[in-house]
Image (cartoon, grey):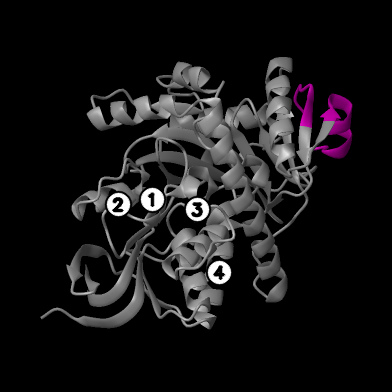
Amino acid sequence: MVANLGKADVAIVGGGVVGIACALELARRGADVCVLEREALGHGCSFGNAGLLTPSLALPLAAPGQTLKALGWLFDRESPFYIKPRFDPALAGWLVRFLLNSRTAPFERGARALIELARSSVDFWEQLAGAHEDDFNFERKGLLSVYETPRSLAAAVRLADFTARVGIGYETWDADTVREREAAIRGEQIGGLFFPEDAHCDPFPAVLALAREAKRHGVRFEEQAEVLDVTRNGTGSSVRTSRGEIRARDVVLAAGAWSGSFGRRIGLRLPMLAAKGYSVLAPRREPHPTRSICLAERKIALTPHRDALRVAGTLELVGEDLSIDRRRVGAMLRGTQHMVDLGEATAEAEVWSGLRPCTPDGMPAIGRARDRQNLWLATGHQMTGLKTAPGTGRLLAALIGGETPDVDPAPFRADRF
């Protein structure tokens, strides 16, 4: 006999940062919300990512000027962007669409929308950190992007000039200023760009703090409840899970990198690929970085915590494979050691891997699914999930409630797929 998990106004498939943020905003508007998570809350991509809360980096994945460079990296196993050679028509189709979206006009349109979503989201994280005793190491000390070649720095300045026009201020630091203000940088560099409004946090504690806030607003969480099927039932849906069945008026798919495969199971065509990234926690060493740092050419993010330095990076289009490629991790750590002293402890460090959900235009899908009356999407955030989750929740809750959103929903339309 199938267990009955009761009823809800909204059932959310996925207990990562985006799903929880959607649940909170819906509950704030009076909805009865249940979040269904197949494992434990926040144990997907939210668990060990870089923890960057950086509107300056809230950009579509498909960027003009970077695509040819990325294609040159594709089959280099130690490069920042890698695809394991395989015959996969879906991958080929995704790459073609990715190329078509790597033009200036769609990139700038998407960047404006993502930056707007990220700016409001970082403000939310700052308020959450200050409102309760939840400690998730939130610090708004800016982001420093460091450059090693004049060509890369010049391209970065052009991009920063664009983001400045939509409100993201920056400062240009020469090499001496970088060494003076960020003593942790020891390698050869020619300067950097500093974004003073950016922030960072410890990602997993941040997700748990968000979940506690959602519980305070009445959200119910069902963990170890894998969703097996969603079927239309009268004016709502029946959601069958490994722990029983729940009936809901609306269903939100916020399953991150697994949204594509689950969507296919319920007849939804969502061109989603999972991109694997790694992170390592290195013991604190002096001088410890005073802010988050991006080693721009190496595509490596460094996030300072009280007792550790988080090193995160790589982008590997893999499907749903969470296995760890030690060669790629080694390349990431060697690239970091070139610029920042990690000591010897990283050789045996515990490595985390996570999957980012990527659409071919590099933009999240937020809104009603195509031809589905009560199925909504909040997925496809690639590397911007943590930094845009609260804004995503507000946008989706407004759309479900028939309100006028405070951001333009058009660039995120879920029915574009």
Closer to the N terminus: mark 4 or mark 2?
4
Element marked by disc 4? helix
Dot label at residue 409: 3
Dot label at residue 370: 2
Residue 186 falls inside the magenta stretch: yes
Dot label at residue 414: 1
Residue drawn 73% across and 57% down? 139
Crowdedness of circle 2 by 10 Å Cα count: few (<14), some, many (20+)? some
Q: Is residue 65 or residue 370 the one in the foreground?
A: 370
Q: Is residue 381 visible?
A: no
Find residue 264 and report its horizontal and vertical position in percent.
22, 49
Residue drawn 72% across and 71% down? 130
Q: Is residue 23 above or below residue 303?
A: below
Closer to the N terminus: mark 2 or mark 1?
2
**Callout 3 amino acid:** Pro
Label 4 sits on residue: 210
